[in-house]
Image: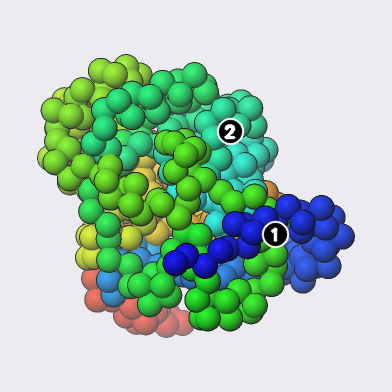
Amino acid sequence: MKIPSPHDLGLHKVLNPLRPVVNPILEYAAKQRLRNAVNIADLRQCAKMRAHKMVFDYLDSGADDEIILRRAKDAYSDLEMHYHVLAGLKPPLDLSTKIFGQDVKLPFFGCPTAGNRMFHHEGESAAARAAQHHGSLYGLSSLATTGITEIGEMHKGPKVFQLYVWKDRELVKEVIQKAKAGGFNALALTVDFTWYGNRERDIRNGFTIPPNYTVTQVVEAIKRPIWTWDFISNDPYKYACINTDVPADSLAAFVNSQLSPEFDWEDAEWLMKEWNGPAAIKGVVRPDDAVRAVKAGFSTMWVSNHGARQLETSPATIDVLPSIREAVGPDVEIILDGGVQRGTDIAKALALGADSVGVGKPYLYGLAAGGTEGVIKALNILKVELDRAMGLLGVGTVDELKKRGPGLIKRRPTGMSVRDYPYPGPNGCC
Protein backbone atom coordinates (compact mmCIF):
# COMPACT_ATOMS: atom_id res chain seq x y z
CA MET A 1 0.00 0.00 0.00
CA LYS A 2 1.41 3.36 -1.05
CA ILE A 3 1.72 6.00 1.67
CA PRO A 4 0.07 9.21 0.40
CA SER A 5 2.57 11.95 -0.36
CA PRO A 6 2.06 15.61 0.59
CA HIS A 7 1.05 16.24 -3.02
CA ASP A 8 -1.43 13.36 -2.94
CA LEU A 9 -3.02 15.04 0.08
CA GLY A 10 -3.12 18.42 -1.66
CA LEU A 11 -0.80 20.08 0.86
CA HIS A 12 0.85 22.17 -1.87
CA LYS A 13 -2.45 23.91 -2.57
CA VAL A 14 -2.60 25.03 1.05
CA LEU A 15 1.06 26.05 1.30
CA ASN A 16 1.52 27.76 -2.07
CA PRO A 17 -0.31 30.99 -1.10
CA LEU A 18 2.09 31.33 1.84
CA ARG A 19 5.20 31.42 -0.37
CA PRO A 20 5.44 35.24 -0.58
CA VAL A 21 5.69 35.35 3.23
CA VAL A 22 7.77 32.23 3.91
CA ASN A 23 10.24 32.35 0.99
CA PRO A 24 12.11 35.55 1.94
CA ILE A 25 12.72 34.15 5.43
CA LEU A 26 13.89 30.69 4.36
CA GLU A 27 15.88 31.91 1.35
CA TYR A 28 17.77 34.72 3.10
CA ALA A 29 20.92 32.75 3.99
CA ALA A 30 20.96 30.93 0.63
CA LYS A 31 20.77 34.20 -1.27
CA GLN A 32 23.64 35.61 0.78
CA ARG A 33 25.77 32.56 -0.04
CA LEU A 34 24.87 32.88 -3.72
CA ARG A 35 25.86 36.54 -3.82
CA ASN A 36 29.21 35.70 -2.20
CA ALA A 37 30.03 32.89 -4.65
CA VAL A 38 33.15 33.64 -6.71
CA ASN A 39 33.49 30.57 -8.93
CA ILE A 40 31.74 27.34 -9.91
CA ALA A 41 33.27 25.50 -6.95
CA ASP A 42 31.57 28.04 -4.68
CA LEU A 43 28.26 27.50 -6.46
CA ARG A 44 28.67 23.77 -5.90
CA GLN A 45 28.92 24.40 -2.15
CA CYS A 46 25.88 26.67 -2.30
CA ALA A 47 23.94 23.91 -4.04
CA LYS A 48 25.09 21.32 -1.52
CA MET A 49 23.90 23.46 1.39
CA ARG A 50 20.47 24.11 -0.14
CA ALA A 51 19.49 20.83 -1.85
CA HIS A 52 18.34 17.54 -0.35
CA LYS A 53 21.31 15.13 -0.12
CA MET A 54 19.71 12.70 -2.55
CA VAL A 55 19.15 15.46 -5.10
CA PHE A 56 22.60 17.00 -4.73
CA ASP A 57 24.34 13.63 -5.08
CA TYR A 58 22.31 12.85 -8.19
CA LEU A 59 23.62 16.08 -9.71
CA ASP A 60 27.17 15.78 -8.43
CA SER A 61 27.94 12.10 -8.98
CA GLY A 62 29.45 9.92 -11.68
CA ALA A 63 29.50 6.24 -12.51
CA ASP A 64 31.03 3.46 -10.37
CA ASP A 65 34.14 4.72 -8.55
CA GLU A 66 33.86 8.14 -10.24
CA ILE A 67 37.33 7.79 -11.74
CA ILE A 68 36.40 9.42 -15.04
CA LEU A 69 34.49 12.14 -13.19
CA ARG A 70 37.79 13.19 -11.61
CA ARG A 71 39.86 12.58 -14.75
CA ALA A 72 37.51 14.67 -16.87
CA LYS A 73 38.35 17.70 -14.72
CA ASP A 74 42.02 16.87 -14.21
CA ALA A 75 42.59 16.50 -17.96
CA TYR A 76 42.28 20.27 -18.37
CA SER A 77 45.00 20.78 -15.75
CA ASP A 78 47.45 18.89 -17.94
CA LEU A 79 47.01 21.47 -20.71
CA GLU A 80 49.17 24.58 -20.48
CA MET A 81 48.29 27.93 -22.03
CA HIS A 82 51.26 29.36 -23.98
CA TYR A 83 50.13 32.95 -24.31
CA HIS A 84 51.24 35.76 -26.62
CA VAL A 85 52.19 39.16 -25.18
CA LEU A 86 51.71 42.68 -26.52
CA ALA A 87 48.74 41.52 -28.62
CA GLY A 88 47.29 45.03 -28.83
CA LEU A 89 43.77 43.97 -27.88
CA LYS A 90 41.08 46.52 -27.22
CA PRO A 91 38.23 45.53 -24.87
CA PRO A 92 35.54 44.38 -25.08
CA LEU A 93 36.52 41.09 -26.67
CA ASP A 94 34.15 39.38 -29.08
CA LEU A 95 32.77 36.13 -27.60
CA SER A 96 30.10 35.69 -30.27
CA THR A 97 30.00 32.73 -32.61
CA LYS A 98 27.59 30.43 -34.44
CA ILE A 99 26.13 27.17 -33.09
CA PHE A 100 24.03 25.02 -35.41
CA GLY A 101 24.36 27.89 -37.90
CA GLN A 102 22.68 30.35 -35.52
CA ASP A 103 24.24 33.51 -34.10
CA VAL A 104 24.88 33.45 -30.34
CA LYS A 105 26.70 35.81 -28.00
CA LEU A 106 28.63 33.08 -26.15
CA PRO A 107 30.56 30.02 -27.39
CA PHE A 108 29.20 27.91 -24.53
CA PHE A 109 25.73 26.98 -23.30
CA GLY A 110 23.80 24.92 -20.75
CA CYS A 111 23.50 21.30 -21.85
CA PRO A 112 20.07 19.66 -21.96
CA THR A 113 19.59 17.91 -18.62
CA ALA A 114 16.68 15.91 -17.24
CA GLY A 115 14.28 16.83 -14.46
CA ASN A 116 15.43 20.35 -13.61
CA ARG A 117 12.52 20.98 -11.26
CA MET A 118 13.92 18.48 -8.78
CA PHE A 119 16.73 21.00 -8.11
CA HIS A 120 14.56 24.11 -7.88
CA HIS A 121 10.89 24.71 -8.62
CA GLU A 122 11.79 27.09 -11.48
CA GLY A 123 13.54 24.21 -13.26
CA GLU A 124 14.11 24.53 -17.00
CA SER A 125 12.40 27.92 -16.95
CA ALA A 126 15.33 29.31 -14.95
CA ALA A 127 17.87 27.92 -17.41
CA ALA A 128 15.90 29.24 -20.39
CA ARG A 129 15.64 32.72 -18.88
CA ALA A 130 19.36 32.71 -18.10
CA ALA A 131 20.16 31.71 -21.68
CA GLN A 132 17.90 34.48 -22.96
CA HIS A 133 19.65 36.93 -20.62
CA HIS A 134 23.10 35.99 -21.93
CA GLY A 135 22.11 35.49 -25.57
CA SER A 136 23.26 31.87 -25.55
CA LEU A 137 21.93 28.65 -27.05
CA TYR A 138 19.43 26.78 -24.88
CA GLY A 139 19.22 22.97 -24.74
CA LEU A 140 16.05 21.17 -23.63
CA SER A 141 16.00 17.52 -22.59
CA SER A 142 13.21 15.22 -23.74
CA LEU A 143 12.96 14.32 -20.02
CA ALA A 144 12.40 17.95 -19.06
CA THR A 145 9.87 18.97 -16.43
CA THR A 146 8.82 22.04 -18.43
CA GLY A 147 7.08 21.82 -21.78
CA ILE A 148 8.37 22.67 -25.23
CA THR A 149 5.78 25.42 -25.76
CA GLU A 150 6.59 27.13 -22.47
CA ILE A 151 10.31 27.14 -23.22
CA GLY A 152 9.67 28.54 -26.70
CA GLU A 153 7.83 31.46 -25.15
CA MET A 154 10.64 32.19 -22.67
CA HIS A 155 13.63 31.81 -24.98
CA LYS A 156 13.34 33.38 -28.41
CA GLY A 157 16.91 32.59 -29.50
CA PRO A 158 18.47 29.40 -30.91
CA LYS A 159 17.44 26.17 -29.19
CA VAL A 160 18.43 22.51 -29.45
CA PHE A 161 16.12 19.66 -28.46
CA GLN A 162 17.71 16.52 -27.03
CA LEU A 163 16.24 13.11 -27.81
CA TYR A 164 17.01 9.64 -26.44
CA VAL A 165 16.98 6.43 -28.47
CA TRP A 166 13.32 5.50 -27.95
CA LYS A 167 11.73 2.30 -29.23
CA ASP A 168 8.42 3.86 -30.24
CA ARG A 169 8.90 5.62 -33.57
CA GLU A 170 5.48 7.24 -33.32
CA LEU A 171 6.54 8.78 -30.01
CA VAL A 172 9.75 10.00 -31.62
CA LYS A 173 7.88 11.58 -34.53
CA GLU A 174 5.39 13.22 -32.16
CA VAL A 175 8.14 14.70 -29.99
CA ILE A 176 10.25 16.06 -32.84
CA GLN A 177 7.19 17.62 -34.45
CA LYS A 178 6.49 19.39 -31.16
CA ALA A 179 10.10 20.58 -31.09
CA LYS A 180 9.85 21.99 -34.60
CA ALA A 181 6.57 23.73 -33.78
CA GLY A 182 8.18 25.13 -30.61
CA GLY A 183 10.92 26.88 -32.57
CA PHE A 184 13.78 24.48 -31.88
CA ASN A 185 16.46 24.91 -34.54
CA ALA A 186 18.40 21.69 -33.99
CA LEU A 187 18.12 18.15 -32.68
CA ALA A 188 20.64 16.26 -30.54
CA LEU A 189 20.39 12.46 -30.41
CA THR A 190 21.90 11.04 -27.22
CA VAL A 191 23.54 7.72 -28.13
CA ASP A 192 25.47 6.90 -24.93
CA PHE A 193 22.39 6.16 -22.82
CA THR A 194 21.20 2.78 -24.07
CA TRP A 195 21.77 1.36 -20.58
CA TYR A 196 21.66 3.07 -17.21
CA GLY A 197 25.09 3.85 -15.78
CA ASN A 198 25.91 2.52 -12.32
CA ARG A 199 25.58 5.58 -10.09
CA GLU A 200 26.32 4.25 -6.65
CA ARG A 201 25.60 7.43 -4.73
CA ASP A 202 22.03 7.18 -6.02
CA ILE A 203 21.79 3.56 -4.86
CA ARG A 204 23.12 4.37 -1.38
CA ASN A 205 20.76 7.33 -1.08
CA GLY A 206 17.74 5.40 -2.29
CA PHE A 207 17.28 7.95 -5.05
CA THR A 208 13.78 8.16 -6.52
CA ILE A 209 11.86 10.84 -8.40
CA PRO A 210 10.06 12.23 -6.46
CA PRO A 211 11.58 11.09 -3.14
CA ASN A 212 10.25 8.15 -1.19
CA TYR A 213 9.08 9.13 2.27
CA THR A 214 11.40 6.86 4.21
CA VAL A 215 12.78 7.87 7.60
CA THR A 216 16.17 8.64 6.01
CA GLN A 217 14.66 10.85 3.31
CA VAL A 218 12.48 12.69 5.80
CA VAL A 219 15.49 13.35 8.07
CA GLU A 220 17.49 14.66 5.09
CA ALA A 221 14.52 16.81 4.08
CA ILE A 222 14.41 18.36 7.56
CA LYS A 223 18.13 19.21 7.22
CA ARG A 224 17.38 21.17 4.03
CA PRO A 225 14.23 23.18 4.83
CA ILE A 226 14.56 25.52 1.84
CA TRP A 227 14.56 22.71 -0.71
CA THR A 228 11.81 20.87 1.16
CA TRP A 229 9.58 23.94 1.34
CA ASP A 230 10.23 24.58 -2.35
CA PHE A 231 9.22 21.01 -3.16
CA ILE A 232 6.07 20.66 -1.05
CA SER A 233 4.66 24.15 -1.69
CA ASN A 234 4.62 23.82 -5.48
CA ASP A 235 2.74 21.59 -7.90
CA PRO A 236 4.18 18.11 -8.46
CA TYR A 237 6.17 17.91 -11.65
CA LYS A 238 5.76 15.68 -14.67
CA TYR A 239 7.97 14.95 -17.62
CA ALA A 240 6.32 17.44 -19.91
CA CYS A 241 7.95 16.77 -23.30
CA ILE A 242 7.17 13.09 -23.76
CA ASN A 243 3.78 12.43 -22.18
CA THR A 244 2.17 14.63 -19.56
CA ASP A 245 0.25 11.59 -18.34
CA VAL A 246 3.51 10.06 -17.10
CA PRO A 247 4.05 11.22 -13.51
CA ALA A 248 7.58 11.78 -12.28
CA ASP A 249 7.48 8.74 -10.03
CA SER A 250 6.86 6.53 -13.08
CA LEU A 251 9.90 7.84 -14.94
CA ALA A 252 12.15 4.82 -14.41
CA ALA A 253 9.53 2.38 -15.64
CA PHE A 254 8.73 4.58 -18.63
CA VAL A 255 12.37 5.04 -19.63
CA ASN A 256 13.13 1.34 -19.20
CA SER A 257 10.20 0.50 -21.45
CA GLN A 258 11.28 2.99 -24.12
CA LEU A 259 15.09 2.86 -24.19
CA SER A 260 16.22 0.95 -27.24
CA PRO A 261 19.64 -0.73 -26.92
CA GLU A 262 19.14 -2.17 -30.43
CA PHE A 263 18.91 1.32 -31.95
CA ASP A 264 21.56 1.34 -34.73
CA TRP A 265 22.94 3.41 -37.59
CA GLU A 266 19.97 2.61 -39.85
CA ASP A 267 17.63 3.95 -37.17
CA ALA A 268 19.82 7.05 -36.90
CA GLU A 269 19.56 7.60 -40.68
CA TRP A 270 15.76 7.26 -40.42
CA LEU A 271 15.72 9.89 -37.67
CA MET A 272 17.82 12.29 -39.74
CA LYS A 273 15.28 12.05 -42.58
CA GLU A 274 12.40 12.63 -40.18
CA TRP A 275 14.05 15.68 -38.63
CA ASN A 276 15.52 17.07 -41.85
CA GLY A 277 17.55 19.83 -40.22
CA PRO A 278 20.71 20.54 -38.24
CA ALA A 279 21.38 17.61 -35.92
CA ALA A 280 24.06 16.47 -33.50
CA ILE A 281 25.02 12.98 -32.43
CA LYS A 282 25.66 13.35 -28.70
CA GLY A 283 28.02 10.91 -27.01
CA VAL A 284 30.83 10.46 -29.56
CA VAL A 285 34.33 9.70 -28.23
CA ARG A 286 35.83 7.80 -31.19
CA PRO A 287 37.04 9.22 -34.53
CA ASP A 288 35.63 6.28 -36.51
CA ASP A 289 32.16 6.79 -35.01
CA ALA A 290 32.38 10.48 -35.84
CA VAL A 291 33.20 9.72 -39.48
CA ARG A 292 30.30 7.30 -39.70
CA ALA A 293 27.96 9.82 -38.11
CA VAL A 294 28.80 12.36 -40.79
CA LYS A 295 27.92 9.77 -43.43
CA ALA A 296 24.64 9.06 -41.61
CA GLY A 297 23.61 12.69 -42.00
CA PHE A 298 24.56 14.35 -38.73
CA SER A 299 25.80 17.91 -39.17
CA THR A 300 27.39 18.13 -35.71
CA MET A 301 29.56 15.87 -33.58
CA TRP A 302 28.85 16.29 -29.88
CA VAL A 303 31.88 14.91 -28.03
CA SER A 304 30.53 13.76 -24.67
CA ASN A 305 30.69 10.91 -22.15
CA HIS A 306 27.36 11.83 -20.55
CA GLY A 307 28.96 13.79 -17.74
CA ALA A 308 31.00 10.75 -16.61
CA ARG A 309 27.71 9.16 -15.52
CA GLN A 310 27.59 6.16 -17.86
CA LEU A 311 30.67 4.03 -18.70
CA GLU A 312 33.35 4.22 -16.01
CA THR A 313 36.89 4.92 -17.31
CA SER A 314 35.57 6.19 -20.62
CA PRO A 315 37.98 8.81 -21.96
CA ALA A 316 38.07 12.42 -20.89
CA THR A 317 36.43 14.28 -23.75
CA ILE A 318 39.11 16.97 -24.00
CA ASP A 319 41.67 14.20 -24.59
CA VAL A 320 39.84 12.74 -27.61
CA LEU A 321 38.74 16.07 -29.10
CA PRO A 322 41.81 16.66 -31.32
CA SER A 323 41.59 13.20 -32.91
CA ILE A 324 37.90 13.69 -33.72
CA ARG A 325 38.59 17.09 -35.24
CA GLU A 326 41.32 15.53 -37.38
CA ALA A 327 39.00 12.72 -38.47
CA VAL A 328 36.05 14.87 -39.58
CA GLY A 329 38.06 17.79 -40.94
CA PRO A 330 37.70 21.53 -40.40
CA ASP A 331 34.17 22.00 -41.76
CA VAL A 332 32.14 19.71 -39.50
CA GLU A 333 30.78 21.38 -36.39
CA ILE A 334 31.96 19.97 -33.05
CA ILE A 335 30.45 20.58 -29.62
CA LEU A 336 32.28 19.34 -26.52
CA ASP A 337 31.09 18.83 -22.98
CA GLY A 338 32.54 17.10 -19.92
CA GLY A 339 34.62 18.24 -16.97
CA VAL A 340 34.30 21.98 -17.66
CA GLN A 341 34.52 24.01 -14.46
CA ARG A 342 36.35 27.15 -15.59
CA GLY A 343 36.40 29.64 -18.43
CA THR A 344 39.97 28.53 -19.08
CA ASP A 345 38.59 25.02 -19.73
CA ILE A 346 36.26 26.47 -22.37
CA ALA A 347 39.17 28.35 -23.97
CA LYS A 348 41.22 25.15 -24.14
CA ALA A 349 38.38 23.22 -25.76
CA LEU A 350 37.83 25.92 -28.39
CA ALA A 351 41.54 26.03 -29.10
CA LEU A 352 41.79 22.26 -29.56
CA GLY A 353 38.99 21.83 -32.06
CA ALA A 354 35.57 22.52 -30.52
CA ASP A 355 33.28 25.09 -32.12
CA SER A 356 31.33 25.44 -28.89
CA VAL A 357 31.20 23.97 -25.40
CA GLY A 358 28.32 22.60 -23.35
CA VAL A 359 28.24 22.82 -19.57
CA GLY A 360 25.99 20.72 -17.33
CA LYS A 361 26.98 20.58 -13.68
CA PRO A 362 28.09 24.25 -13.48
CA TYR A 363 24.71 25.70 -14.37
CA LEU A 364 22.81 23.03 -12.42
CA TYR A 365 24.82 23.99 -9.33
CA GLY A 366 23.58 27.52 -9.93
CA LEU A 367 20.01 26.31 -10.39
CA ALA A 368 20.09 24.26 -7.19
CA ALA A 369 21.68 27.18 -5.34
CA GLY A 370 19.21 29.85 -6.40
CA GLY A 371 16.98 29.32 -9.43
CA THR A 372 17.19 31.85 -12.26
CA GLU A 373 19.57 34.10 -10.34
CA GLY A 374 21.89 31.15 -9.76
CA VAL A 375 21.96 30.05 -13.41
CA ILE A 376 22.58 33.60 -14.62
CA LYS A 377 25.46 33.84 -12.16
CA ALA A 378 26.95 30.49 -13.22
CA LEU A 379 26.98 31.50 -16.89
CA ASN A 380 28.33 34.94 -16.02
CA ILE A 381 31.20 33.46 -13.98
CA LEU A 382 32.24 31.35 -16.99
CA LYS A 383 31.79 34.29 -19.35
CA VAL A 384 34.06 36.56 -17.28
CA GLU A 385 36.65 33.79 -16.91
CA LEU A 386 36.63 33.03 -20.65
CA ASP A 387 36.96 36.72 -21.52
CA ARG A 388 39.93 37.03 -19.16
CA ALA A 389 41.57 33.88 -20.51
CA MET A 390 41.26 35.06 -24.11
CA GLY A 391 42.66 38.47 -23.23
CA LEU A 392 45.65 36.97 -21.45
CA LEU A 393 46.22 34.49 -24.29
CA GLY A 394 46.33 37.39 -26.74
CA VAL A 395 43.26 36.58 -28.86
CA GLY A 396 40.39 38.97 -29.37
CA THR A 397 37.71 36.76 -30.94
CA VAL A 398 36.49 33.19 -30.77
CA ASP A 399 37.47 32.68 -34.41
CA GLU A 400 41.02 33.82 -33.68
CA LEU A 401 41.20 31.46 -30.71
CA LYS A 402 40.15 28.54 -32.93
CA LYS A 403 42.62 29.41 -35.69
CA ARG A 404 45.61 29.94 -33.41
CA GLY A 405 44.59 27.38 -30.83
CA PRO A 406 47.05 24.54 -31.53
CA GLY A 407 49.96 26.91 -30.95
CA LEU A 408 48.49 28.25 -27.72
CA ILE A 409 47.58 25.05 -25.87
CA LYS A 410 50.21 22.38 -25.20
CA ARG A 411 50.14 19.28 -23.06
CA ARG A 412 52.45 19.31 -20.06
CA PRO A 413 55.03 16.48 -20.24
CA THR A 414 53.75 13.38 -18.49
CA GLY A 415 55.10 12.80 -15.02
CA MET A 416 56.53 16.29 -14.62
CA SER A 417 55.46 18.66 -11.89
CA VAL A 418 56.02 22.39 -11.62
CA ARG A 419 59.10 21.68 -9.50
CA ASP A 420 60.63 19.58 -12.28
CA TYR A 421 61.12 22.61 -14.49
CA PRO A 422 64.64 24.05 -14.26
CA TYR A 423 64.79 27.34 -12.43
CA PRO A 424 67.50 29.69 -13.74
CA GLY A 425 69.89 31.06 -11.17
CA PRO A 426 70.98 34.70 -10.92
CA ASN A 427 73.46 34.26 -13.80
CA GLY A 428 71.00 32.50 -16.05
CA CYS A 429 72.30 29.02 -15.27
CA CYS A 430 70.37 26.23 -13.58
Residue at the image point whose x is 18% and y is 29% from the top: 267
Q: Quadrant of the N terminus?
A: bottom left
Residue 120 pos. (x, y %): 62, 56
Bin the neighbour count of mark 2 within 10 Å (Cα to Cα): few under 14, some 14-19, many 20 and up: many
Which image quadrant for residue 424? bottom left
Q: Nearer the viewer, residue 26 or 333?
A: 26
Tag of residue 362: none
The residue pinned by badge 1 equals 11
Q: Secondary structure at mark 1?
A: helix
Q: Is residue 415 above or below residue 135?
A: below
Q: Is residue 184 at all visible to an observer of this figure?
A: yes
Q: Is residue 223 above or below residue 251?
A: below
Residue 361 pos. (x, y %): 48, 57
Left or right, 366 with reference to 225: left
Q: Secondary structure at mark 2?
A: helix
Which image quadrant for residue 175? top left
Left or right, 10 with reference to 247: right
Which image quadrant for residue 300? top left
Residue at the image point whose x is 31% and y is 36% from the top: 189
Q: Nearer the viewer, residue 271 or 19?
A: 19
The residue pinned by badge 2 equals 151
Hey, what amino acid is under mark 2?
Ile
Residue at the image point whose x is 56% and y is 40% from the top: 146
